[in-house]
């Protein structure tokens, strides 16, 4: 039996632990807090992040990171801004043979590094993979049909991962485009905030459709500069994830944007949340990358101005609408 553990007991980490268990493997589910681990083991549900979803037997929660690091495969599901610290803490107990599967979607705020680059710095000897797609945690945990991209350079290891993690209701599509599999999931966090602002501000479905379309243009521009393939960005980890996150209040990023569009204050919104909203931290990192590579990403810059620049939502919207008219071919992907 393959030993697969999950690092991070939020909603998606819990959902993936259930998926791994349903594929026939016992699972250790790591959480930072001892009281959270005790509650998970006692109540057999994650009241804090994924309430009313039963946690099956064969899943054990622990706050012992050294113990959780002992596995053939580790699914890394901590928030993107905590990946580096978690890997550093885990490193002394991490076998070089352990495959690291990155499930966090984001770009490191302080360094503008992709998650694959962070793994490469801390654990360069470990094989790494990226798991990303249009996946809401509750639906995954419920066993509803879903699909995702699994990006890895080693095709043989990738096939083994699909066999170990995949299910008929959780279909994994292999790719070797590790860069491309990360960009869509990171940028869509920011685009979802923008679409939420449109929804909360009652700017209409036409505006949301335009944002999604022009947002894809921004994803493709960034992807081209970083070496991603367009077909990856138009696949599950790109367009698929954008469509899901930019269309539903189930998305934490969309719902945060909707609250901003209704006039709520960012700090107050975040205080009321237990789960991390990745787009808040990824926005500034994306804008730094855009400036570094001289890429036009006006939607991401508008969101960053709202979140981190003190610009009112109305002013950011006005700036976008005041942009000069362009030929679509010249302003396209």
Image (tube, helix red, strand yellow):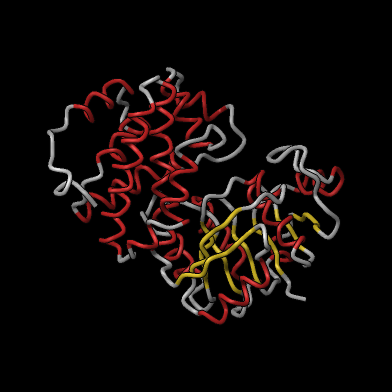
Residue 160 vertical position relative to residue 257 in the rendered view, above or below: below
Horizontal and vertical percent for residue 101? Answer: 57, 66
Total marks placed = 0
270 and 325: which is toward the camera? 325
Residue 69 vertical position relative to residue 200 in the rendered view, above or below: below
Residue 131 quadrant: bottom right
Task: Please report the residue visible at 76 percent of the width from the left and 61 percent of the height from the top.
Answer: 21
- Which quadrant: the N terminus? bottom right
Horizontal and vertical percent for residue 191? Answer: 38, 40
187 and 77: which is toward the camera? 187
Residue 99 vertical position relative to residue 244 in the rendered view, above or below: below
Task: Please report the residue visible at 30 percent of the width from the left and 20 percent of the height from the top.
Answer: 314
158 left or right of 8?
left
Task: Please report the residue visible at 80 percent of the width from the left and 46 percent of the height from the top.
Answer: 40
56 and 83: which is toward the camera? 56
Find the residue positioned furthest to the top: 263
Horizontal and vertical percent for residue 116? Answer: 45, 65
Task: Please report the residue visible at 49 percent of the width from the left and 43 percent of the height from the top.
Answer: 244
Horizontal and vertical percent for residue 249? Answer: 53, 32
């Amino acid at each position: 039996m393959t030993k697969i553990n999950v690092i991070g007991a939020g909603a998606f980490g819990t959902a993936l632990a259930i998926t791994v268990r349903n594929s026939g493997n016992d699972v250790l589910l790591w959480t930072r807090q001892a009281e959270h681990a005790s509650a998970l083991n006692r109540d057999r549900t994650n009241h804090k992040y994924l309430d009313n979803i039963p946690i099956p037997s064969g899943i054990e929660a622990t706050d012992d990171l050294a113990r959780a690091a002992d596995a053939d495969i580790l699914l890394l599901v901590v928030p993107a801004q905590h990946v580096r610290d978690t890997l550093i803490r885990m490193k002394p107990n991490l076998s070089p043979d352990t495959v690291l599967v990155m499930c966090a979607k984001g770009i490191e705020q302080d360094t503008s590094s992709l998650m694959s680059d962070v793994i490469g710095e801390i654990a360069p000897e470990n094989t790494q993979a990226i798991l990303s797609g249009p996946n809401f945690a509750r639906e995954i945990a419920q066993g509803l049909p879903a699909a995702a991209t699994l990006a890895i350079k080693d095709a043989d290891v990738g096939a083994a991962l699909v066999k170990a993690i995949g299910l008929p209701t959780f279909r994994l599509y292999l790719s070797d485009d590790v860069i491309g599999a990360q960009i869509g999931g990171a940028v869509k966090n920011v685009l979802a905030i923008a679409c939420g602002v449109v929804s909360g501000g009652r700017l209409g479905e036409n505006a949301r459709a335009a944002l999604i379309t022009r947002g894809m243009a921004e994803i493709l521009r960034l992807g081209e500069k970083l070496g991603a393939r367009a077909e990856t960005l138009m696949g599950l980890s790109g367009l698929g994830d954008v469509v899901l996150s930019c269309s539903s209040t189930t998305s934490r990023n969309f719902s945060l944007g909707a609250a901003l569009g209704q006039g709520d204050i960012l700090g107050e919104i975040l205080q009321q949340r237990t789960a991390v909203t990745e787009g808040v931290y990824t926005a500034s990192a994306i804008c730094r990358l855009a400036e570094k590579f001289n890429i036009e990403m006006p939607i991401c810059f508008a969101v960053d101005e709202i979140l981190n620049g003190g610009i009112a939502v109305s002013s950011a919207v006005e700036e976008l609408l005041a942009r000069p008219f362009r030929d679509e071919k010249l302003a396209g992907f």
